[in-house]
Image (cartoon, grey):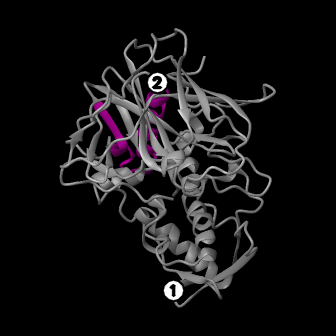
Amino acid sequence: MISRRTLLAASMATLSAPLLTGLAGRRAAAATKPRTPAQTPATLPVKVKNNTGSDTVYAFVTGLSINNGNALMLIQADGKTPYYPVSPPSSLTPLAKNCAIPLNKSGGTAKTITIPYMAGARLWFSIGSPLTFYLNPGPALVEPSVTNPSDPNINLQWDFCEFTYNGSEMFADISYVDFVCIPIGMTLTSAGGTQQKVPGLPAGGLDTVCSKLTAQAAADGNPWTGLIVTSNGQNLRALSPSNGIVLNPSFLQGYYQGYVDQVWQKYESATLTVDTQASWGTVTGQVTGGLLTFPGVGSFAQPTTADIFDCDGGPFNPNGMSPEMLAVVPRLAAAFNRSTLLTDSNQPDGENPADYYTNAVTNHYARIVHATTRGHLGYAFPFDDVTPDGGVNQSGPLVSPAPTNLQVTVGPVH
């Protein structure tokens, strides 16, 4: 997983590739070279339908060009011509090409965008005005940020979905890891007509999420309403807890501490088994000397609330970890976010999504997102793809080795 974006002194986030929070991002590194021979078409049509209720909606496509040395690439406003930015002489340089793809009127026909092989890609949307992207030397793409008040996009309605398209498959997901804003739904069609669908948020989904955050704040006295961002008296977006902490480092500080203490106490006498779901099989750990230790694998100190929500800080920081430890981290982090460690000593084997988020202390943002999305699927925290063998992947990925088209609906799916 690519760690959360860092903010520049220049008031926006910059990356040499898009910051990705979903499965498409995690697969990007392995997907940057097409397999030979390719079994997917060299290009794929993405049909984008505007159901927002606004006739002024724009799309942007950003990512890495697999067939051009993983160079930074955008699609130009015609929806098909690649644009490869060159390194600019200074920071915050405007794009040299118009990459704002205008969608058709709300309720009208879909707009077709043609994509080549791309890794770590995003399909962005904005309502009312195009998004503003810049370039920094590298070239590095300066992306919109929801945590920087100086960002030129801060008062726009904007959102994105993620994908990686290479010689072996199309892989796409809807990410709510950073925030909730515009409903987005996806349908992936494969050769033979088989379809996979993730309908996303319903009409009024953002307002529902905000209402449930308000209800949770009233129920437990914690400031969940601090995640709600408004503009002109209307809900603009709901931030994830990790982004709430970016804006306010004291947000929910210590929230998980009591739960973590209970987990540590439990596993001082009991053992925790984690299925790496890889070649290492299962590993067993216990708390000794204040550390959750998996003999021969590694140890974890107690995570803070921020570590749990972000999934890559403190004891979950992947730097210097062995591959085996890297397989334990997502399963342990997911169990903390879902608050299942007190009820299940085998992670993630045999878990039922109905039991996720049932503890009073849990990631209520993720709980609310899943409760609100149609089908209850969507990427709600960085390791929401952790899935028991034979279970349903809660992040709702769409995957096909023989795709014929991807349909994306901006606004509620009817």
Left/right of residue 56 with respect to residue 12 in the rendered view: right
Residue type indicated by callout 1: Gly
Quarter of the rendering containing residue 131: top left
Left/right of residue 166 with respect to residue 125 in the rendered view: right
Provide the residue designation for mark 1: 290
Measured as percent of width and height from the top left, residue 45 is found at 60, 26
Quarter of the rendering containing residue 41: top right
Which residues make up the magenta segment? 204-230
Residue type indicated by callout 2: Gly
State the residue at coordinates (28%, 51%).
247
Provide the residue designation for mark 2: 79
Crowd tier of the residue under label 2, counting other residues whose Cα lies within 10 Å: few below 14, some 14–19, many 20 or above? many
The answer to whether 403 is drawn above or below residue 71 in the figure is above
Left/right of residue 281 with respect to residue 313 in the rendered view: right
Left/right of residue 9 with respect to residue 313 in the rendered view: left
Measured as percent of width and height from the top left, residue 94 is found at 23, 37
